[in-house]
Amino acid sequence: MSKSKKKLRVIPLGGLGEIGKNITVFEYDEDIIIVDCGVAFPEDEMMGIDLVLPDLTYLRNKKDKIRGIVLTHGHEDHIGALPYVLRDFNVPVYGTKLTLGLLKTKLEEHRMLSDTTLEVVQLGQTIELGVFQVEFIHSCHSIADAAALAIHTPVGIVLHTSDFKVDYTPIEGASINLARFAELGKKGVLLLMCDSTNAEREGYTLSERIVGETFEKIFVNIQGRIIVATFASNIHRVQQIINVAVNFNRKIAISGRSMVNVVNVALELGYLSAPEGTFIDINDINSYPFEKLMIITTGSQGEPMAALSRMASATHRQVEIVPGDLVVISATPIPGNEKMVSKTINNLFQKGAKVIYESLADIHVSGHACQEELKLIHSLVKPRFFMPVHGEYKHLIHHGLLAEQLGMPTKDIFIMDTGNILELDSSQAKLAGNAPSGKVFVDGLGVGDVGNIVLRDRKLLSQDGMVIIIITIDKETGTALTNPDIISRGFIYVRESEELIAEIRAITKSGLAECQGKDWSTIKNHVKKSLGDYLYTKTKRKPMILPIIMEV
Amino acid sequence: MSKSKKKLRVIPLGGLGEIGKNITVFEYDEDIIIVDCGVAFPEDEMMGIDLVLPDLTYLRNKKDKIRGIVLTHGHEDHIGALPYVLRDFNVPVYGTKLTLGLLKTKLEEHRMLSDTTLEVVQLGQTIELGVFQVEFIHSCHSIADAAALAIHTPVGIVLHTSDFKVDYTPIEGASINLARFAELGKKGVLLLMCDSTNAEREGYTLSERIVGETFEKIFVNIQGRIIVATFASNIHRVQQIINVAVNFNRKIAISGRSMVNVVNVALELGYLSAPEGTFIDINDINSYPFEKLMIITTGSQGEPMAALSRMASATHRQVEIVPGDLVVISATPIPGNEKMVSKTINNLFQKGAKVIYESLADIHVSGHACQEELKLIHSLVKPRFFMPVHGEYKHLIHHGLLAEQLGMPTKDIFIMDTGNILELDSSQAKLAGNAPSGKVFVDGLGVGDVGNIVLRDRKLLSQDGMVIIIITIDKETGTALTNPDIISRGFIYVRESEELIAEIRAITKSGLAECQGKDWSTIKNHVKKSLGDYLYTKTKRKPMILPIIMEV
């Protein structure tokens, strides 16, 4: 096959039609690179699950082709799956200094750091991975050191924005490198893959700087302690909080494991700065007057075990909320977390704190581009083909409509789902089947040992509990020996339901009589069915029924 | 005791510090009236629960004093508990025509209609209930026929706004009777109880009429079917949808049980109107061209069993979504429902429908007053005392702050919790202890038979499932007879975990050996503990462990 006939395959193995676990495979002939490798957080119906990983079955037999994993930034939905994935795919990982700094902390926790090759890349630098040249472009996002990628391939340039916003007044360093986007656009971009998170929102995302200005206004006359909760990874937000604290002559204590981790990494690598003596140990806060204290904490999403929620429920070891405390939640609830956040807010108010949150002031801005910013990127890049990425289906659809409004032909826009394969040469793009894809569940120490049957049982058990019927059968005669024992959990207060238990016994016994001489599985099914029908009629509940037969 | 020494007790038994199950008791000497009697919907941790009722223990021994139940409007969180509560408290129920019309449907479903006394009250009318005169004042809310109540008591007037907004251009009938609020204010109002739902929102709530104007704009050039989902009880919204359908010459089919019920009741009682022949049966929709069809449906909250969700997941019997369909979700997700609504939207897009929802257009307005409206009410009523009601703690707090800003002394504002008792005479008000209060769970046919232990077990089972160990012990010798049987559900794939099962057996057997001769409860606890420790170390999961001992 001549080289010109070979195709580039772009395969999102996560992140499309869903929020989280972003990962894209780029494959050309004998070379593969992987861009990002994130986790998703479990949906309500994934009971007991801790994390969701992408299914990488597609790569199982292609390990030798993988030249490296390239990371765009250090958020969990872009790097969180690496400690699991690197066990199977031990390939070099490339990313900016902060991204790899955050990854290091994770790998250390998993005791995998020494086995992994991490290669720091500068923004602006291009690395060579097989046939691919991957160029790291300076970008802006709600974490420092974020990159967009220009992937130079044998069939053309793929521009992958990853998560971004256009912030003309960023807290640190340069703005997103729009000039490079324009240059690449002029040169000719084959495929644009662009962040769709805010594709439904009109206008522009506000600059991160706005939040600092709000802090200045809010904190100016506060006499009590100030406690600010935000995303640990939002280094620029944390820097602004530090700046205001320093302005107002307050010492800073940090609470929450991930906040401590990130702040340490960021200080060490130079992404955060503060005058000597700004930070104090959280255990020492009582040595300082309240008006000289600022606490930066995790828990902006109301997560029950996070530091702020523990303060709100009076289970935090060092911080007891008292009247006069000001708590600022500098974040928006991620969809699904609204009620947990509300609960935290209500608890804080009940302890007498003043609480400021999103609906009351400009104390958070998004890290993702809104429609006008997306239009800017499309106009600069002028891609031949377009794949909206990073979003639920509704976000991808609206991003597609936006591209159409800018004049792109519908046929050149690919609204794809996780697992779909896009095949491109230098002039054409088409869908070319599906790669295996899906969700791998992490539950405790287990990875992939909980599947749909286990989850279905957890769901059933959570709804109506279970009833266990223990039946003792004489080995010789096949007749039931004693009254069946009944044990239930999560179904009904058994002690208050003697009548029901007596009836369960009676139905079981008459069932056993009918089934005399039949095999166990027939007996079990019969008991399950007749008891299930009875309990549903009587209670309109469907507990899991587990008949256990003991032969003696 | 002279009459002047007697006190009025106002006891919210639900609805404060929470969303839902609104109910307030007014007690004076030998007379009690109850205002509203609603349900709440279960929180995530109330697994398997269908509905939450208020705990009415406080009224158990006071049945003879109850003169009646007064309803302000027909929403579930104000009337939904009546079919359960009326079983114990069979007292007359007073409300406006539509409110009682909706209640009738519920009582019919529970086969309780013939046992209940329902008394229709006109807006503007005053009824006498023991020492209380209850005046129904014309109000505005997201349901027709809503009332505010002026409760004339021996110690003064209590003005209870219930849920309201100030809509100067309502769809039907007069606006909220602000003149009467002003008159009462002039006369002197002892206590104001006022809706706090939107106390955090600045400005004014938009008029319901805005939504109709948006519909007109959106629907003007649509060629396909139009499907509109909204709250069934929002009669004015439904009327506006009907009006637009008639304007655009479309027939209307109704889908979803509650929508069918409400539309029937409202048409019958004259709260909805449409030209003859406007409505068609949902089974006949295929006899009409798409551009002549409008479907009004339930499911605006993404409820999995509601009609719109069934259309979205291709399980609706009559309606199959096809490209060209326009779906409008005319509602805001209630907190906690965001992800279900998103799922429905994504599914509809995937079937090729165009979907319009809140973030894209003005297709919903709130039914609750924002800050400027609340200020208006406070200024007209000028109450001596104020109790913010109907909201989470954060809403009550902000409503209290609003009253302070208007000049009310902090000591006259009572931020209360469900169950707190406020005692008033004509010049004083003070907190006077607590009435028993709480949540009664409805699960299937059971009311109150599921409590915290059952819920705790459901929660445990949902997280990590369970492991059952069946141990057979010789009656004579006390020694274990055979290998223990292991059954697990919701824990792990047992077939893939032979090693684990073998280890469970071994640990159980060694535990049994150690406990030889001990009583069963000691044996069980020992097995639970040693297996629990082992499984946690091995898997970081904590399944429920159920040892079952059989003596033979």
Image (tube, coloured by chain):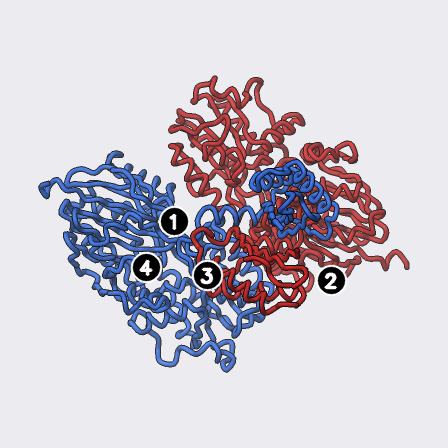
Chain colours: A red, B blue
Residues marked 2 and 3, same chain: yes
Q: Are marks 4 and 3 on the same chain?
A: no
- Residue furthest to the left in view is B2
Relative to B358, does residue A338 appear above or below in the rendering? above
Where is residue A236 drawn, in percent x and y?
58, 33
Residue behind mark 1: B439
Q: Residues within 10 Å of mark 2 (few under 14, many from 20)?
A: some
Taking the image as shown, residue B238 lies to the left or right of residue A147, namely left
Marks 3 and 1 sit apart, C-alpha to C-alpha, by 20 Å
- Between marks 4 and 1, how big is the CA–CA gap? 15 Å
* Marks 4 and 2 close (CB-CB < 8 Å): no
Position above or below: A318 against A421: above
Foreground disc of the pair 2, 3: 3
On the same chain: label 2 and label 1? no
Estimate the x, y position of residue B136 in percent, counting from the top left: 21, 58
Q: Which residue is mark 3?
A: A539
Chain under disc 2: A
Mark 2 — residue?
A431
* In-image side of B87 versus A239 (left or right): left
For label 2, the SS is strand
Within 10 Å of disc 4 (Cα), the crowding (few <14, some 14-19, many 20+) is many
Name the element at disc 1: strand
